[in-house]
Amino acid sequence: MITTNWWRRSATALTATALALLAVPAQAAPVQTAAHRVPGETVATTFFAAIDALDVADERREGYVRTAYRHWTDADRNGCNARKDVIISEAVKAPAVGPGCTLTGGEWFSPYDDVVVTDASGLDVDHVIPLAENWDSGGYSWTAKEREQYANDLADPRTLIAVTARSNRSKADKDVAEWLPPATEYRCRYTEDWVAVKTRWGLSVDPAELAALHRIAAGCEDVPITVVLAR
């Protein structure tokens, strides 16, 4: 039961990766630089190569307010906002969905802390790259619409994840140099997702963050990573 949710939320990324591996040579293609990024383009690379391709820059927190990111919208107008959509899609046992997208029953697995949750009210939906970290890493220069699109990104299952409220609030706005999931067996996957989301959205890393990524990756496999560039 513990691994079911992990594989369910991985299915899209794994399928895309498998197809990409059939189409690309063994040597990973470099991720495009900011000047050559084409939104909507699919990039197939590897975990280690994606880390090396990230732009390195000091963080810029000045001017950040959480309200700069309009989040939990219902862009697809299905009656459930982005937060509820994530919770529903990641359920190990599906909840009943009532009027106003109220959720009853259901079961979830929180990979951050290896905990099974049986009440949706005990879940938070985490931005793998926190909103403040997004701002620090380049989001400060984005338009309001781009920030809204990031904050509600359902197109890539690595951007948002349902986890226990306790683990999400422990993480807060920390990056990988400051916080990693308590469940040690999930740390490689968490870091892979961190790099994939930064690649998707063209976000930079600061020097301490880059050092942490290399340190963590030294204990992980150089797995394939496929992303569709969002900007």
Image: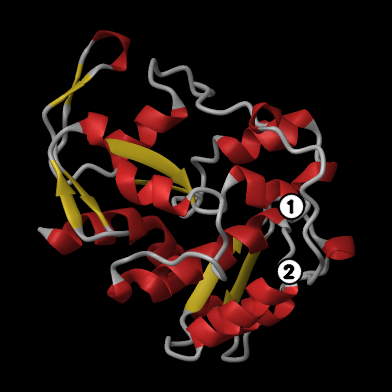
The quadrant holding residue 149 is: top right
For the residue labelled by badge 1, is the local secondary structure a helix, a strand or a loop?
Answer: helix
For the residue labelled by badge 2, is the local secondary structure a helix, a strand or a loop?
Answer: loop
Toward the viewer: 124 or 15? Answer: 124
Q: Which residue is mark 2?
A: 206
At horizontal 58% and vertical 78% (from top left) the residue drawn is 212
Q: Considering only order in the chain, which callout, 2 or 1, is on the residue closer to the N terminus? A: 1
Residue 65 left/right relative to 17: right
The quadrant holding residue 56 is: bottom right
Mark carried by residue 173: none
The answer to whether residue 56 is above or below residue 149 is: below
The answer to whether residue 92 is above or below residue 192 is: above
Can I make out residue 30 in this image? no
Q: Quadrant of the N terminus?
A: bottom left
At horizontal 65% and vertical 45% (from top left) the residue drawn is 132
Residue 46: x, y in percent? 56, 80
Can I make out residue 96 in this image? yes
At horizontal 73% and vertical 69% (from top left) the residue drawn is 206
Residue 70: x, y in percent? 63, 26
Mark 1 and mark 2: Cα distance apart in space: 9 Å
Question: Badge 1, how many Cα within 10 Å: few under 14, some, many 20+?
Answer: many
Residue 181: x, y in percent? 37, 64
Q: Tag count in the figure?
A: 2
User: Type of residue at label 1?
Assistant: Asp
Mark carried by residue 136: 1
The answer to whether residue 177 is above or below residue 134 is: below
Residue 37 left/right relative to 128: right
